[in-house]
Image (tube, rainbow, N blue to C red):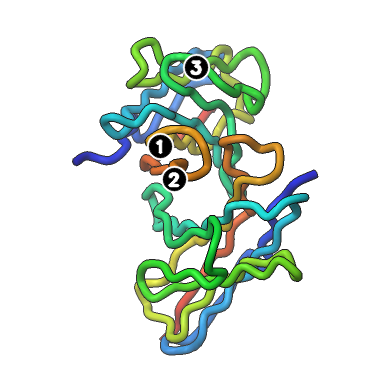
Amino acid sequence: GAGVSQTPSNKVTEKGKYVELRCDPISGHTALYWYRQSLGQGPEFLIYFQGTGAADDSGLPNDRFFAVRPEGSVSTLKIQRTERGDSAVYLCASSEGVGRAYNEQFFGPGTRLTVL
Amino acid sequence: AQSVTQLGSHVSVSEGALVLLRCNYSSSVPPYLFWYVQYPNQGLQLLLKYTTGATLVKGINGFEAEFKKSETSFHLTKPSAHMSDAAEYFCAGFLTGGGNKLTFGTGTQLKVEL
C-alpha cells in the first residue's frame, strides 16, 4: 500500500512561468487536500476535493491558483504567472472520506517550489 | 478567529529528559486535535489524535498528549527524549467552522542534545 505521492519533489521556475504540481492519493481515498507550507510556518489550507469536485477552495490565495481532480483520484495544482512569493512546499493529503470520524489525513512528502 | 497556537518555536532538551511541547487552541466547541511530526524533507506523520472520549491520548514513539478543555490546551509530552525525536512538531485541529480543513500551529523545532 503506497502512501500519498507527489511529483516533482522539487521545482525551480522563473517568475511569470506556469507550473503544475501533481498528487497521487492513497488508493480508495475519496477526499484530497492541498496545503502550502511557507518557510518557518505551519501548513495552510488551500483546497479540498470530495471526489471530483472542489468542496472548499476558500484557501486559494488568488485566481492564479487552480486545482483539478478530473477522475476523482490524481489531482493537479496549477499556478499561473508565478511570483516569488509563491515559493513554498506544497503538501497534498488524502483521507478515506469526509466527516470527522473518518477524516485522518495522510500527507505526501511535498513539492518544494522555488520561484526565481 | 479560530486558531492553534504553539508556544516556543524552538525547544532544546537533553537526551533522556522530559519533552514538553505546548499547544493551545481557540474554538467555540471542543475541536478534534492532532500532533504531527515532520522529519527533514519528509511529509507530515501523525503522532496522535484526540477526537472524543479519553482526554489522555497515547501515540507512536512514546508520545502522549492530554486534552484540557478548561485550559484550551493539548500539550505533547514524552518522558524520555531520544536523539531520533529531533524533528519539527505541528499541532493541528479541526476547528469550529473549519469543515474538513486542518488548522496548523506554526510548529516547534525540537533539538535533542547529548
Q: At numbered mark 2, what does the secondary structure look like: helix, strand or loop?
A: loop
Q: Residues within 10 Å of mark 2 (few under 14, many from 20)?
A: some
Residue highlighted by disc 1: A95
Q: Position of residue A6 (x, y in %)?
A: 34, 32
The location of residue A12, given as percent across then percent down, is 43, 28
The answer to whether the residue labelled 2 contacts the one labelled 3, judged by CB atoms less than 8 Å apart, is no
Q: Is residue B106 above or below residue A31?
A: below
Give amino acid for label 3.
Ala
Sequence order check, earlier mark of 2 and 3: 3
Q: Residues within 10 Å of mark 1 (few under 14, many from 20)?
A: many
Residue at 38% over, 49% down = B41
Mark found first going from the N terminus, 2 or 1: 1
Q: Given the image, what chain letter belongs to the residue carrying mark 2?
A: A
Q: Are marks 2 and 1 in contact (CB under 8 Å)?
A: yes
What is the CA distance from the residue labelled 2 to the residue labelled 3?
22 Å
Q: Which residue is mark 2?
A: A104
Lateral position of residue A51 relative to residue B51, left or right = left
Judge left or right: residue A89 versus residue B28: left
Look at label 2 and name its amino acid.
Glu
Q: Quadrant of residue A4?
A: top left
Instruction: Pinpoint residue B24: horizontal percent, then vertical percent.
Output: 70, 63
Query: Are discs 3 and 1 less than 8 Å apart at CB?
Result: no
- A13 or B53, which lies in front? B53
Q: Which is more toward the observer, A33 or A53?
A: A53
Q: Compared to B52, does B95 lie above or below?
A: above
Q: Quadrant of the N terminus of chain A?
A: top left
Residue B90 visible, this angle:
no
The residue indicated by pointer 3 is A67
Seen as rendered, the residue at the extreme front is: B53
The answer to whether residue B69 is above or below residue A73 is below
